[in-house]
């Protein structure tokens, strides 16, 4: 049980809504756009790819930050290497296993949809590794939010619709924007909590660059932008307005952030942000499916 628990913790379950939501929303876009209806095995394979890439990225982040000593004095959830629960080699192997699972699921989709998916998958894996791995990780240069928006917003959402329809649909691009912004909010709250430690470690995240106050305003602005994105989606499929109801759950994390919560007090805010992401995403997906 202890062995299983450490790897579950290392996979960072609170971040997994970022992998679930784009698949749900992208698949919902495809409702009504395919002659034979939704292919559920393709949706399931897309979900495996998304989850596996998220977990692989989390493991890469764990061992890369652990090697650099960034996690030596950590306030947030436990890290395997930084806490001594696993070695760098063990976490590297876990990242490779997760990447392998994503590769197998992606290959099954490529076999029936097209080889272009292999290219998208390879680029996504490389981006996940380069986030904190390699000699010049872009996560240390304030570009992590851009990566999250592109790959857990645009690529994952549009890609999930694409494996169903075989084309890039305008609505898929539209809804990918709020989906990506929700994922960015999760990273922003994580980096807000880590500003003191990241500053000392020389990790120049966007939060470090913006400072405490600027990062808090960014967090609030992201939810306002999400609401705007859902409204635009609702203009194409009216039931998509249902996603706005999910933003009620953003009141708690926004209040905590604007109230000045810091350090360990931001850990539950991270969980609340993840729940908001999941609720908004699933309600948006339900609305899109109903309007399809």
Image: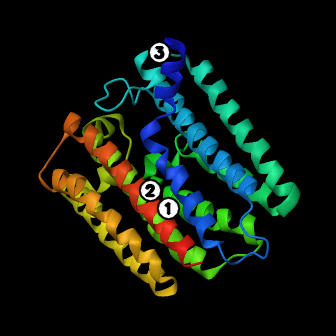
Residue 149 badge: 1
Q: Badges 3 and 2: C-beta atoms under 8 Å apart?
A: no
Of the residues under marks 1 and 3, which one precedes in the sequence?
3
Residue at position x 66%, y 78% in the image: 169
Tell me the distance, in whole angstroms, between the alpha carbons under discs 2 and 1.
Answer: 7 Å
Of the residues under marks 3 and 2, which one precedes in the sequence?
3
Residue at position x 47%, y 22% in the image: 80
Q: Badges 2 and 1: C-beta atoms under 8 Å apart?
A: yes
Which residue corresponds to mark 2?
A: 183
Mark 2 crowdedness (10 Å alpha carbons): few <14, some 14-19, many ≥20? many
Which secondary structure lies at badge 1? helix
Most foreground residue, 242 or 206: 242
Q: Is residue 213 above or below residue 87?
A: below
Which residue corresponds to mark 3?
A: 85
Mark 1 crowdedness (10 Å alpha carbons): few <14, some 14-19, many ≥20? many
Tell me the distance, in whole angstroms, between the alpha carbons under discs 1 and 3.
Answer: 31 Å
Residue 82: x and y in percent read 42, 22
Residue mark closest to the camera, 2 vs 1: 2
Quarter holding the C terminus? bottom right
Task: Answer with left or right where residue 126 lies relative to residue 25.
Answer: right
Task: Answer with left or right where residue 11 lies relative to residue 182.
Answer: right
Residue at position x 36%, y 39% in the image: 202
Q: Quadrant of residue 203?
A: top left
Tell me the distance, in whole angstroms, between the alpha carbons under discs 3 and 2.
Answer: 28 Å
Q: Is residue 90 above or below residue 274?
A: above
Task: Answer with left or right where residue 248 lies relative to residue 287.
Answer: left
Q: Badges 1 and 3: C-beta atoms under 8 Å apart?
A: no
């Amino acid at each position: 049980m202890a062995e299983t628990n450490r790897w579950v913790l290392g996979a960072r379950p609170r971040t997994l809504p970022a992998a679930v939501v784009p698949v749900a929303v992208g698949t919902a876009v495809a409702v009504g756009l395919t002659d034979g209806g939704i292919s559920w095995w393709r949706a399931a394979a897309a979900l495996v790819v998304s989850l596996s890439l998220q977990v692989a990225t989390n493991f890469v982040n764990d061992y890369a930050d652990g090697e650099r000593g960034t996690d030596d004095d950590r306030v947030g959830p436990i890290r395997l290497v930084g806490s001594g629960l696993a070695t760098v080699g063990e976490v590297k192997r876990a990242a490779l296993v997760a990447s392998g699972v994503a590769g197998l699921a992606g290959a099954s989709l490529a076999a029936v949809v097209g080889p272009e998916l292999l290219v998208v998958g390879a680029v996504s894996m490389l981006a996940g590794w380069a986030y904190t791995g390699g000699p010049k990780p872009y996560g240390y240069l304030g570009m992590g939010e851009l990566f999250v928006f592109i790959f857990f917003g645009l690529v994952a959402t549009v890609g999930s619709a694409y494996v169903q329809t075989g084309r890039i649909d305008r609505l898929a691009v539209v809804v990918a924007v709020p989906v990506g912004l929700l994922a960015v909010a999760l990273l922003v709250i994580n980096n807000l909590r880590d500003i003191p430690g990241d500053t000392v470690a020389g990790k120049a995240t966007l939060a470090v660059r913006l400072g405490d106050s600027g990062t808090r305003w960014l967090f609030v602005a992201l939810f306002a932008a999400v609401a705007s994105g859902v409204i635009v989606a609702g203009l194409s499929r009216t039931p998509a307005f249902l996603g706005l109801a999910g933003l009620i759950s953003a009141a708690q994390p926004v209040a905590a952030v604007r109230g000045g919560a810091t350090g360990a007090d931001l850990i539950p805010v991270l969980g609340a942000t993840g729940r908001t992401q999941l609720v908004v995403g699933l309600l948006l997906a339900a609305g899109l499916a109903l309007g399809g």
